[in-house]
Image (spheres, rainbow, N blue to C red):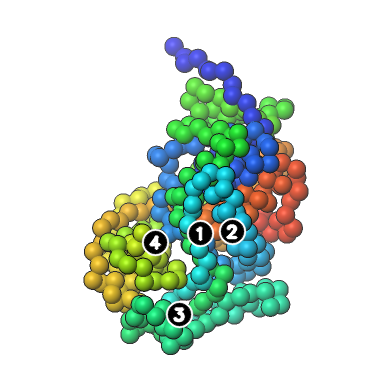
Amino acid sequence: MSVPIKKEKTADVLVIGGGLVGSAVAFGMAECGARVIVLDEGDRAFRAATGNAGLVWYQGKGRGMRRYQEWTLEAIRAWPGFAENLKELTGIDVFYHKPGGLTFCISEAEYESRRDLIDTIRREAAPDDYDCTMLDRKEVQELLPGMKLGDGVVGASYTRQDGHVNPLALLKALHAGLKKCGGFYYSGHTVVDIHRHPDRYAAQTGKDVFTAPKLVIAAGNGTGRLAQIVGMNIPVRPEKGEILVTERIRPCLPLPCNRIRQTTDGSFLIGASQEDAGFDIRTNTRVIKGMAERARTVFPVLGKLKIIRSWAALRVKTPDKMPVYEGSDSAPESFAIALHSGVTLASVHAIELPKWILNRHEPEGFHHFRSRRFDV
């Protein structure tokens, strides 16, 4: 006997995916007055936020695509007001701070490679627009009076634009903000199929059906499969990243670093591994050992701390590691978003993307983010 389909639930926009990307866009549209439904797998999803170090990161992004560097800078500038708005609306502090950030180099080869990257992005950016510089070992140590550098540190890249946030508090605040603005979040609702009707889209999750005239697919590594149903080719793949968490100590690291960050509760997050392992999220002891050794090379004091837990999560990567924002040519009013910078770009996703989705006011230069750039 077939299972009867429940009555349809309707909205102005359906958002498939309740992670940081989908939730930021959904919150922004709800704040604009749209009736929004978010469909999410829930805790069983391969959610990138669970393995995110919480960096709101500017440096090193955008080589080969100036618009990505500019889009990231727009996000950084919007973050203070965005964080304050979330706190006022939901009462949740996401602990956003912008003290600047460092990317360490532990060999001369790493230093030269990093300098070449920064110089290339600076040449591609608008004149005097790229705020990032290389520091030698002495200059780095002056920024970190409470943390003695290891002998292997040659230098680092630095920008005052970088900061950090609590990614799980951010996700919680986005869900709370969505509901405060009249939106609906359905956890445990995996979308199994999408049907296109003349005036609406219908997403089926088991025995439930949700409909709306607009559809946004922001389902992480599931975006490619779902987008194909409505005529969009969005190439994405999972990349495994692992995180180590130390015991808590007094605050002593004033700046976030690309592989090491001290949280507000005193723990150190050690990460930034990159593994092509499909959907395997088991921890890899060889990778964990390498991460710990590098962290100890940068800050020898970390070698005295206990590792209290470790885990792995999956990033969402496109072929060139830059975002895809797609509006379907064959299925009007359907959109797809795929990227790995869900924390950094959360501010512009909530502020700028609703104008694109609700009113077709596409941000300037957005054509650079279309997936047709891969059709070569």
- Where does residue 177 sit, x and y in percent of width and height? 56, 42
Q: Residue at x 55, y 36 (%)?
A: 179
Q: Which residue is mark 2?
A: 79
**Is residue 212 positioned above or below 315 on the image?**
above
The reply to whether discs 4 and 3 touch (Cβ–Cβ < 8 Å) is no
Q: Residues at badges 1 and 2 in contact (C-beta under 8 Å)?
A: yes
Badge 1 local density, few (<14 within 10 Å), some, or many (20+)? many
Label 2 environment density (alpha carbons within 10 Å; few <14, some 14–19, many ≥20):
many
Q: Hey, which quadrant is residue 52 in on the image?
A: bottom left
Which residue is drawn at the image coordinates 47% and 34% (left, top)? Answer: 187
N-term-proximal mark, 4 vs 2 = 2
Query: Which quadrant of the figure contains the C terminus?
Result: bottom right
Q: Which residue is mark 4?
A: 263
Residue located at (53% from left, 18% from top): 6
Q: Which residue position is annotated with label 3?
A: 143
Q: Position of residue 312 (x, y in %)?
A: 35, 54
Query: Could you tell me the amino acid type at mark 3?
Result: Leu
**Amino acid at pointer 1:** Tyr
Q: From the viewer's side, name the closer residue of 232 and 263.
A: 263
Q: Measured from the top left, where is residue 14 in percent x and y?
A: 61, 35
Asked whether 259 or 96 is in front, the reply is: 96
The CA span between labels 1 and 4 is 11 Å
Q: Is residue 352 left or right of residue 260?
A: right
